[in-house]
Amino acid sequence: MSASVVPVLFKAACPDCRCRFELAAGALRLAIGASRRTTFYSFTCPECGSAVRKPAGERIVELLTGGGVRTLRLHTTA
């Protein structure tokens, strides 16, 4: 018996049109910077088309990376 893969959906909201929705991992992007101010996730609102960027704390980073969201590292770890 093969296990079915259930796509991960993330709840999100647009600050511009105030719409709430769920997004698949492929619709989100995560940027991990050297500080809290440069670590964020972004997406395009499916309702109004606005580009949305929100800060991502440690827990959000864990959830997004664990859910398969594409990650860009903005700093190098030496």
Image (cartoon, rainbow, N blue to C red):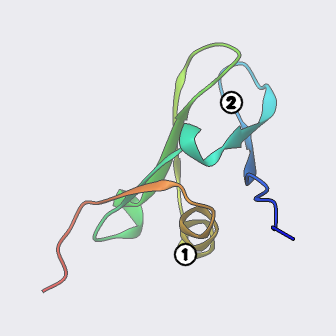
Say which of 47 and 66 sits in front.
66
Relative to 33, is 54 on the left or the right?
Answer: right
Secondary element under disc 1, as helix, strand or loop, is helix
Specify the quadrant of the image occupied by residue 77: bottom left
At x 41% / y 67%, what residue is drawn? Answer: 36
Residue 33, image x, y percentages: 31, 64
At x 33% / y 70%, what residue is drawn? Answer: 35
Residue 45, image x, y percentages: 63, 25
At x 62% / y 74%, what residue is drawn? Answer: 59
Relative to 30, is 3 on the left or the right?
Answer: right
Q: Please, is residue 65 above or below residue 15 in the view?
A: below
Q: Residues within 10 Å of mark 1 (few under 14, many from 20)?
A: few
Q: Residues within 10 Å of mark 2 (few under 14, many from 20)?
A: many
Q: Amino acid at mark 2?
A: Cys
Q: Amino acid at mark 1?
A: Glu
Residue 71, image x, y percentages: 40, 58
Relative to 17, is 61 on the left or the right?
Answer: left
| Residue annotated with mark 1 | 58
Alpha carbon separation for disc pair 2 and 1: 21 Å
Specify the quadrant of the image occupied by residue 28: top right
- N-terminal of the pair, mark 2 or mark 1, is 2
Q: Residue furthest right?
A: 1
Q: Please, is residue 67 above or below residue 13 in the view?
A: below
The image quadrant where one finds the N terminus is bottom right
| Residue annotated with mark 2 | 14
Say which of 37 and 14 sits in front.
14
Relative to 20, is 14 on the left or the right?
Answer: left
